[in-house]
Amino acid sequence: MNLASIDSAATRGESWLHKAAPWAKLSAFALVLAAVIVNWNLLVLAAIGLLLAAVVASSRAPAGLAFSLALYPAIFAAIFAVSAAPDVITGAVIILKAVVAALAAVTMMLTTPYPQVFAPLQRLVPAIVGDALLMTYRSTFLLLGKFANLMTAMRLRAGVTAGRPLRTARSTARALAGTLLYSIDLAQRDHDIMRLRGYESRLRVTAVRSASVPVDVALVAVAAGVAAASTASRVWAETLNPYTWIAPAVGALLLVAVITIGRKSR
Amino acid sequence: MSHIHIPDGVLPVWLWVLGWVAAMALVGIASRFAIAEDHRRKVPLLGVIAALMLVAMSSEIIPIAYHVNLTVLGGVLLGPVLAPIAAFVVVTALALVGHGGVTVIGLNTVVIAAEMLIGWALFRTITRALGRRRASIAAFAATVPTLALTTLLLVGIVWLGGGKELTARETGALDPADMRFENPLGDGVFVAKLFAGDEHAHDHGAGGHEHDAAEEPCTDTHAGGCGEACEDEAAATLSVGRFAAVVFTLGPIGWLLEGLIIAAIIGFVARVRPSLVFEGALAENRAAIPGDETGAHR
């Protein structure tokens, strides 16, 4: 999982979705997640997935990264589905729920910098938890860099080789231990810097202003529509089930249209 | 393996809401204790240990759907007060990149926090019994039973929420016995009834009782019975037994791997910086900057 690439996509992108207000994206994410939670129809879930794919395409977020991240939970969901689902269809629904919910989360994270996602959370959780979320975000990239450098050094000194798994495991554990020692020193240095800069009890995140309020409202309205449609298809399933094939068909058309328009505009 | 990779919308609402309530209570209590003393020092420490766990948890070993957690290591370094906060931070950050559902953040926090607390307690106890020179053995001996216990907790959570029957309404349009695709714009343009959609109302003979699987979940108390259909629907539940069998078959491989890795890390750190392992990360470098010995600026 390339956390650095996620951060890069979120901070460097300039699409309509990158410019939308974080509150709008968080609200839309919550509504789409609700749509995934309430529904057990494979076709409706596929339609939501296609809609999200269209959003990814229109936002010019790295599609390969988005879909590889969204497919990652499918591995774990498949274990649960194979072991617990009563039939193939239910198993497929469980896997699709995992993939579509992950795609919604990843779409938000690829278009919104982490601190902007954590800022609303900071108001809900105790100060130490909110600050720890932000410090974790910062430290993750430092540790990833350090760990990668250590592994490169070990590989150059033949400490990590495919033919010697035991030696490789021992080297990897030592690299992790080295990273741990580095991380403790890093924490001490952060502490000293925070003390010097007068940190008392809360790190502040500056809120990003919306580029266009109508776009924010439209984003939330579409997400609310998806949640309402998903709920309706569950509540009136007996009547609507024969027509749910329309949803993925519309989603597929939308995706093709977005991709075509995107190619022409380049 | 021990934290929940169950997607959003599979566990019942009451269960994941209860998980959120329990997690918030746990994190709230831990925060109260944590801010009582040396608050500024704990924030960066929490950040780096949570980041280390995050880096470990986001690297999967695909063939057995397993990844290293480093939770026991985190518990040993952070101690019981900071462990629940680190658990919440890690689980939230992972859920935001699609690793574990958002709704199960609460339940995952409880499981991970339990793992860190049990690991910490077992490591302390075993180290006291074996002595400091056998730190890596103590780490291995603490990690394996901790992971076994939290996997049991995971199965317990699935058992609490997974036994619910899935109704015909839930399985939706793609029940092979009832697969129909119809045109909403008018009769007769096209109606494709795959798998003989009209015949899904089964006639069960004797009393001529028709049980429509798509219309109602079977609660069979009807005279004459609807044996076969009811058996099919009774089977339409999440199989907790099968899930437990799979988890407890794959789990031990992961427990051993994690145990060996944590033993190697703790063994190494115990040699080069023992106070970190035996007294916790907060015991390190207690020296204060001259003029700031009292802590926060007031």
Image (cartoon, coloured by chain):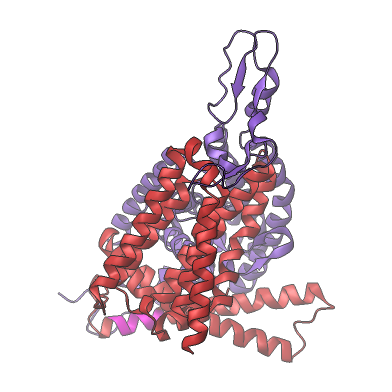
Chain colours: A red, B purple
Please identify the dominant SS of the magenta region: helix
Instruction: Assess whether residue A191 is covered by the magenta stretch.
Output: yes
Q: Please tell me which residue is depicted at 45% across the width and 75% down the height of the picture.
A: A110
Residue at the limit of the structure toward the right, as seen here: A163
Residues drawn in magenta: A188-194
Please give the name of the residue rendered at 36% of the width and 54% of the height, measured from the top-left corner: B27
Where residue A73 sits, quadrant-wise, is: bottom right
Evaluate whether residue A11 shows in this view.
Answer: yes
Assess whether residue B233 is covered by the magenta stretch: no
Q: Which picture quadrant has residue A16?
A: bottom left
Give the image location of residue A189, x and y in percent: 39, 83
| Circle count | 0
In-front residue for pair A238/B242: A238
Compare residues A28 and B137 and report the one nearer the observer.
Answer: A28
Q: Residue furthest front?
A: B188
Kindly identify the residue that appears in the image at 27 percent across and 66 percent down. A217
> Which quarter of the image is occupied by the C terminus of chain B?
bottom left
* Residue A8 percent location from the top left of the image: 46, 83
| x then y, percent, for residue A116 | 33, 73
- Asked whether residue B96 appears in the rendered view, the answer is no
